[in-house]
Image (cartoon, rainbow, N blue to C red):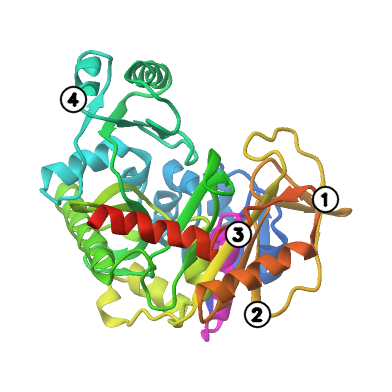
């Protein structure tokens, strides 16, 4: 019997929990959540509710249930040091230590690491701890991207042409960031198409999962404010319609070099997910940033079609044996769309109950930021339910996914265009224009 601890309560963790329980191994799942996700709870032997910052409670729960290894879902527990806490009581974890979670929590650390070890993929950038020299550097580039150094919930990055128009506005935002953050990163704006490449690392070996394209913008046509992600899609051939397979391999090579650089720089092996946000430009694949955990929503796409036994994969990473396992996925396309509160991402003090009925077995439903109470499933101000359609083509997967939203009742909304032929064709045309 393998006792597994899952830390996290979102749709990403629901997909992880489902993958754990699909394993052919003899396993039990124990979950530590800050809110009662009914999907995770139904799959768990036992559940504890509490704050992710309460490391003593997490350790006590792990000891009480004789946990063999832990899987950490969100970035906050990694940043707090959940992996380090588990190590203190002799439990291995799928996830990096607090020190190595800087791959996500400190964008400046990652940029400087990539630069120091000549990994490649960096844009022109500079890290500022004050405004000294800032105006001069801003003027060196046509357009810029401003990134606070630290966790911002995926919503702190601002791009010229999208969130502001002038260099003066960029300067003002940098000053604003420096009031609450130790540093700010200023980068040249890269033009191209983005893709997410979630890789698994054991510290020496790195393997990739299928590329995914996420959609951050709130409304159809990529309009409106940035969000944590409104949906995403994969293709059946392990690529995406606008990219080549070599593009994905280039992203994998960058990630392998970064894993090696981390080991050389720190002496620690990076165990867990290295989720790279990449962009295909006229000059090739460039690195936007790394996250130190599975993507949300991207994990729902890739976990839904994973053929490899999930526990085998996690154990191979934890034990440094990824070179001894084949990581395989069903040759199927997936489309994920999020149901979100109507006012998301500006919703505050949201009240309401949501329900889902009569969902076909070939559709995946993953509960996100919800709380199950006696009178039903209460929504919060964040994303509510992830829906994943799976089929031979993106078009078929999108149709399956979209059909389910008639069955979701409550004060929620979604983007109808994710995975549609029109939106994907825009990506293909854009990439063709860039490569030509």
Q: How many marks?
A: 4
Comparing 144 with 95, the one in front is 144
* SS for dot 1: strand
**Residue corresponding to mark 1:** 353
Q: Is residue 269 visible?
A: yes
Q: In which quadrant of the rendered view does residue 18 lie?
A: bottom right
**Residue corresponding to mark 4:** 140
Look at discs 2 and 4 and give the one toward the viewer.
4
In the rendered image, the quadrant that contains the C terminus is: bottom left
Looking at marks 4 and 1 on the same chain, the residue that comes earlier in the sequence is marked by 4
Looking at marks 1 and 3 on the same chain, the residue that comes earlier in the sequence is marked by 3
Look at discs 4 and 1 and give the one toward the viewer.
4
Pinpoint residue 291: horizontal percent, then vertical percent. Answer: 38, 50
The verdict on residue 14 being magenta is: yes
Q: Callout 3: 10 Å neighbours few (<14), some, many (20+)?
A: many
Looking at marks 2 and 3 on the same chain, the residue that comes earlier in the sequence is marked by 3
Q: Callout 1: 10 Å neighbours few (<14), some, many (20+)?
A: some
């Amino acid at each position: 019997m393998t006792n597994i601890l899952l830390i996290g309560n979102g749709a990403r963790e629901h997909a992880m929990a489902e993958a754990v329980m699909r394993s052919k191994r003899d396993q039990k799942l124990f979950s530590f959540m800050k809110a009662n996700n009914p999907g995770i709870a139904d799959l768990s032997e036992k559940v504890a509710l509490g704050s992710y910052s309460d490391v003593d409670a997490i350790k006590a729960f792990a000891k009480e249930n004789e946990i063999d290894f832990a899987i950490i879902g969100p970035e906050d527990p990694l940043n707090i040091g959940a992996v380090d806490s588990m190590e203190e009581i002799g439990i291995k974890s799928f996830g990096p230590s607090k020190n190595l979670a800087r791959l996500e929590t400190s964008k400046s650390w990652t940029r400087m690491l990539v630069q120091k070890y000549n990994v490649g993929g960096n844009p022109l950038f500079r890290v500022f701890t004050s405004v000294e020299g800032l105006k001069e550097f801003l003027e060196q580039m046509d357009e810029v991207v401003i990134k606070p150094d630290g966790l911002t919930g995926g919503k702190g990055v601002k791009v010229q042409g999208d969130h502001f128009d002038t260099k003066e506005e960029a300067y003002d935002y940098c000053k604003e960031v420096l009031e609450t953050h130790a540093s700010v990163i200023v980068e040249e704006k890269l033009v191209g198409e983005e893709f997410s490449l979630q890789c698994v690392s054991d510290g020496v070996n790195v393997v990739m999962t299928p590329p995914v394209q996420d959609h951050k913008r709130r409304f159809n046509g990529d309009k409106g404010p940035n969000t944590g992600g409104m949906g995403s899609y994969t293709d059946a051939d392990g690529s995406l319609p606008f990219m080549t397979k070599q593009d994905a391999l280039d992203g994998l090579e960058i990630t392998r070099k970064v894993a090696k650089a981390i080991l050389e720089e720190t002496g620690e092996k990076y165990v867990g997910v290295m989720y790279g946000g990449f962009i295909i430009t006229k000059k090739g694949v460039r690195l936007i940033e790394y996250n130190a955990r599975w993507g949300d929503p991207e994990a729902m796409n890739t976990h839904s079609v994973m053929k490899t036994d999930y526990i085998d994969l996690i154990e191979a990473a934890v034990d440094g044996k990824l070179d001894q396992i084949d990581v395989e996925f069903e040759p199927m396309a997936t489309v994920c769309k999020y149901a979100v509160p109507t006012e998301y991402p500006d919703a505050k003090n949201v009240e309401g109950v949501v329900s889902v009925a009569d969902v076909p077995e070939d559709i995946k439903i993953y509960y996100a930021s919800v709380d199950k109470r006696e009178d039903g499933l209460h929504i919060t101000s964040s994303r509510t339910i992830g829906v994943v359609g799976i089929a031979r083509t993106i078009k078929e997967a999108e149709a399956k996914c979209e059909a389910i939203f008639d069955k979701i009742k409550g004060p929620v909304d979604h983007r109808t265009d994710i995975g549609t032929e029109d939106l994907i064709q825009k990506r293909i045309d854009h990439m063709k224009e860039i490569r030509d």
